[in-house]
Image (cartoon, rainbow, N blue to C red):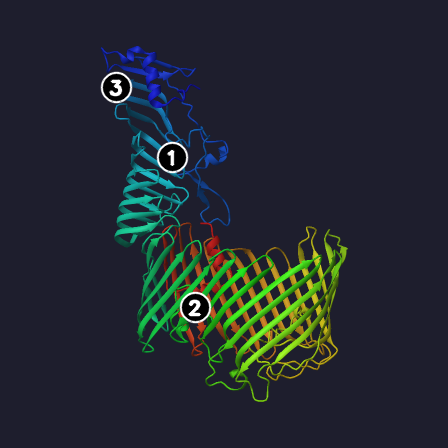
């Protein structure tokens, strides 16, 4: 096909003038000539209209297949039939063959048309399909007029403008060929990466990253959908800053206006900008109406602040503030909240939190987590939108660490604020640790040393609870592993050394007890395999663990950080039945375990089952706080099973069975189904004799492509009462989502039930209107993961 040779626009006109002197005749400077390209790509000009020619401007690359191109909407909307894709389509611009000058700072202009009519020194008229390219920008239209003197062009009818990430269509466009600024009348646009489209009476392209819409609107909704849109007399969209600004703005949901603002700024991507965030609205039985309106201060690229005024109808006006700071050595967050004279308790309520992690120097690390609240009922009464822990013992901890190749050290100060009734944990003021290891051809030497001073408020405490003081602990370990593909043998020897310097010791006991106790163990296992008919493998793995720890009276030692560990299959092979470093359990025992696994032909485990029991050759005399001596000659029987029924379904079962009659003493059953982040079901049942009998159910389950149910049900079977019930229903379209939740929960402060209802209305691409604090939804397994991964 004939085409104009790829010369810069100005050069092309000059060559035409030299080839046809009549065009530059001084006697007739306004003489009109009709020019077209012949089959060899050369100019042919005369006084009669040129024959119609089809231009050969670079076309979309074949990588965007012809079938795909045929499905493009006028706004680059590509329909996709995919079950888990909510929009059933996406914006996708066709790709073009690279011409080699796309990244040039000042690329030439190339112009292509089926027919041209030039007026020397005046206007050039281009017809029958006009294509203009400069670098990676392209513009096409049915016809165009080019003002050679002012270097401006006027494109008419079916105007299409493209640059990476942007599409604009218009009835006509006026473009400055030097600055690339332009005005597009009766126009529509698409920002592909931002999933935004809009229309306007006029769109002004001000620069590479900024466009202005006059009497325009924009929306996240796909072409053909007007569920919501933002309309304004003027809208500025700045892709460089990631934000937009609208004047005299109306937000419409369907045809109904629901919000007006004289000036409104809003995000068009994930970057930050100062301004009001979306307000929250909620209602609970205990607090009444709860309204908050946060304001975000984008102070600098590495620090910001969010101030949230909050009105709680039954309590008063509250302020919450969160300041964040980040540099190459530290990351810090400061949270504050204050409610003066809470109307329900007639007292001030407040919260203070600071968290910091840092790397002050090579190998060094720092960590601070300090939280304080005005009273023990703070989180139960007020909740919070601040990112703070809500545990029964609030951390007040500072750490400094150093890590080298084979050793590391820790300095820690650790205290608590206890929010529940009972004895508060010990403070570690301070705690110092040093540990390391060395290896020599399968022989490993480890060492661990620690100094801690344990302190607490001992007012109103009695007996062992009043003991405070220091503890020094040292434990070197030497072990050697002989391993083969069919099994291993690992003997080890430890030396447990602990020394105390105590205050308020119980009468008759040593103030400075010292213990030095050897610990010897032998761990060995063999793996047998057999091939299965389906190409997989079954293993049989017997395991023997022998442990010897001599009996030494440790009754003078306090209980600073020690408890009896839960008994399960893994505990059969531990060297100590206690946690912490205040006790080392005496032992003369052999533990036997047997595991079988089923592996598929790819080597993935589909089923494992383990059973084991310990056999004792002496009583276990070492106890905590005067507990009873264990005289049984054998342990209960423990089992552990994990069944991967398929990649979606996983079932686990842990049991402790009485060795005398095989009655269940403990049971932990977990049923987990996960098709994807939008479809999952989790059920667990936990039973411990005379301690607990509870179920916990979580689910996120699509009822259809648009509707999803989700919830949690936690029940105490022994007390025959629900602990927490959450039930929610969501409706989601391509461009908005509506979530409604009901919650009923048992409060920990007064053991009474509270009720709340919550509504979230989310406009995708604009933000959300949240109804109160919905942090409890994070307790539903997979809720946060789903919100992060959902593809709109």
Q: Which residue is mark 1?
A: 162
Residue 688, numbered label: none
Tell which tag, 1 or 2, sits nearer the viewer: 2
Q: Position of residue 347 (x, y in %)?
A: 32, 77
Q: Quadrant of residue 689?
A: bottom right
Give the distance between the C-alpha atoms of the residues marked 1 and 2, in whole angstroms: 53 Å
Q: Which residue is mark 2?
A: 370
Above or below, 150 against 468 in this view is: above
Asked whether, in this view, residue 354 is left or right of residue 516, the answer is left
Asked whether, in this view, residue 166 is left or right of residue 235, the answer is right
Badge 3 or badge 2: first in the primary sequence? 3
Q: Which residue is mark 3?
A: 121
Query: Which residue lies most toward the bottom here?
Result: 508
Seen from the viewer's position, the closer of residues 454 and 21 is: 454
Badge 1 or badge 2: first in the primary sequence? 1
Badge 1 or badge 3: first in the primary sequence? 3
Q: Position of residue 95 (x, y in %)?
A: 46, 34
SS at circle 1: strand
Q: Say few, some or many: other residues with alpha carbon within 10 Å of mark 2 (under 14 / 14 to 19 / 20 or more).
A: many
Give the distance between the C-alpha atoms of the residues marked 3 and 2, in whole angstroms: 77 Å
SS at circle 2: strand
């Amino acid at each position: 096909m004939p085409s104009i040779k790829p010369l810069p626009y100005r050069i092309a006109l000059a060559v035409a003038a030299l080839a046809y002197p009549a065009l530059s005749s001084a006697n007739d400077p306004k003489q009109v000539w009709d020019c077209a390209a012949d089959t060899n790509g050369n100019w042919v000009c005369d006084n009669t209209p040129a024959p119609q020619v089809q231009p050969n401007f670079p076309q979309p690359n074949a990588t965007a297949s012809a079938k795909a191109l045929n499905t493009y909407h006028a706004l680059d909307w590509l329909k996709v039939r995919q079950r888990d894709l909510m929009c059933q389509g996406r914006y996708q611009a066709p790709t073009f063959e690279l011409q080699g000058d796309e990244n040039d700072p000042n690329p030439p202009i190339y112009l292509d048309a089926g027919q041209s009519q030039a007026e020397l020194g005046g206007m050039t008229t281009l017809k029958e399909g006009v294509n203009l390219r400069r670098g990676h920008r392209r513009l096409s239209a049915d016809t165009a007029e080019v003002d050679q003197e002012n270097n401006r062009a006027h494109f008419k009818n079916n105007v299409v403008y493209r640059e990476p990430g942007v599409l604009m269509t218009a009835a006509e466009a006026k473009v400055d060929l030097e600055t690339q600024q332009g005005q597009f009348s009766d126009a529509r646009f698409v920002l592909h990466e931002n999933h935004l489209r809009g229309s306007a009476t006029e769109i002004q392209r001000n620069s590479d990253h900024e466009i202005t819409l006059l009497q325009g609107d924009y929306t996240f909704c796909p072409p053909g959908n007007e569920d919501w849109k933002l309309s304004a007399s003027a809208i500025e969209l700045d892709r460089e800053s990631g934000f937009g600004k609208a004047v005299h703005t109306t937000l419409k949901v369907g045809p109904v206006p629901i919000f007006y603002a004289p000036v409104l700024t809003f995000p068009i991507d994930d970057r930050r900008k100062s301004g009001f965030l979306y307000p929250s609205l909620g209602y609970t039985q205990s607090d009444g109406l709860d309204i908050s309106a946060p304001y975000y201060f984008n102070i600098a690229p590495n620090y910001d602040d969010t101030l949230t005024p909050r009105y709680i109808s039954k309590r008063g006006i509250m302020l919450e503030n969160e300041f964040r700071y980040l540099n190459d050595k530290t990351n810090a967050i400061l949270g504050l909240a204050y409610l003066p004279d809470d109307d329900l308790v007639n007292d001030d309520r407040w919260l203070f939190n600071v968290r910091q992690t840092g790397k002050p120097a090579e190998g060094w690390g720092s960590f601070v987590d300090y939280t304080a609240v005005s009273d023990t009922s703070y989180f139960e009464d007020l909740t919070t939108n601040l990112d703070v822990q809500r545990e029964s013992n609030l951390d007040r901890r500072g750490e400094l660490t150093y890590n080298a190749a084979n050793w590391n050290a820790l300095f820690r100060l650790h205290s608590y604020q206890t929010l529940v009734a009972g004895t508060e944990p010990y403070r570690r003021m301070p705690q110092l640790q040093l540990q390391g290891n060395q290896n020599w051809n399968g022989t490993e030497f480890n060492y661990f040393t620690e100094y801690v001073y344990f302190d607490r408020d001992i007012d109103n405490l009695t007996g062992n609870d009043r003991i405070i003081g220091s503890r020094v602990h040292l434990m070197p370990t030497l072990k050697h592993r002989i391993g083969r593909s069919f099994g291993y043998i690992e003997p080890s020897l430890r030396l447990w050394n602990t020394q105390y310097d105590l205050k308020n010791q119980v009468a008759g006991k040593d103030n400075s007890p010292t213990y030095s106790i050897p610990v010897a163990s032998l761990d060995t296992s063999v793996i047998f395999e057999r091939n299965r008919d389906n190409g997989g493998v079954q293993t049989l793995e017997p395991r023997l663990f022998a442990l010897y720890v001599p009996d030494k009276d440790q009754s003078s030692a306090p209980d600073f950080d020690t408890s009896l560990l839960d008994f399960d299959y893994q505990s059969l092979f531990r060297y100590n039945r206690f946690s912490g470093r205040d006790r080392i359990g005496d032992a003369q025992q052999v533990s036997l375990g047997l595991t079988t696994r089923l592996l598929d032909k790819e080597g993935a485990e589909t089923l494992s089952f383990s059973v084991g029991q310990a056999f004792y050759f002496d009583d276990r005399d070492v106890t905590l706080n005067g507990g009873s001596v264990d005289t049984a000659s054998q342990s209960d029987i423990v089992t552990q099973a994990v069944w991967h029924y398929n990649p979606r379904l996983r079932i686990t079962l842990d049991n402790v069975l009485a060795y005398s009659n095989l009655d269940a003493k403990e049971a932990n059953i977990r049923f987990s189904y996960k098709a994807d982040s939008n479809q999952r079901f989790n059920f667990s049942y936990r039973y411990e004799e005379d301690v607990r009998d509870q179920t916990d159910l979580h689910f996120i389950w699509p009822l259809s492509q648009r509707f999803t149910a989700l919830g949690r049900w936690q029940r105490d079977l022994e007390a025959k009462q629900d602990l927490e019930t959450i039930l929610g229903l969501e409706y989601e379209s391509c461009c908005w989502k509506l979530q409604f939740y009901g919650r009923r929960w048992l409060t920990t402060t007064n053991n009474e039930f509270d009720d709340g209802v919550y509504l979230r209305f989310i406009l995708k691409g604009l933000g959300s209107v949240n109804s109160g604090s919905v942090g409890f939804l994070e307790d539903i397994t997979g809720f946060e993961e789903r919100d992060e991964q959902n593809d709109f």
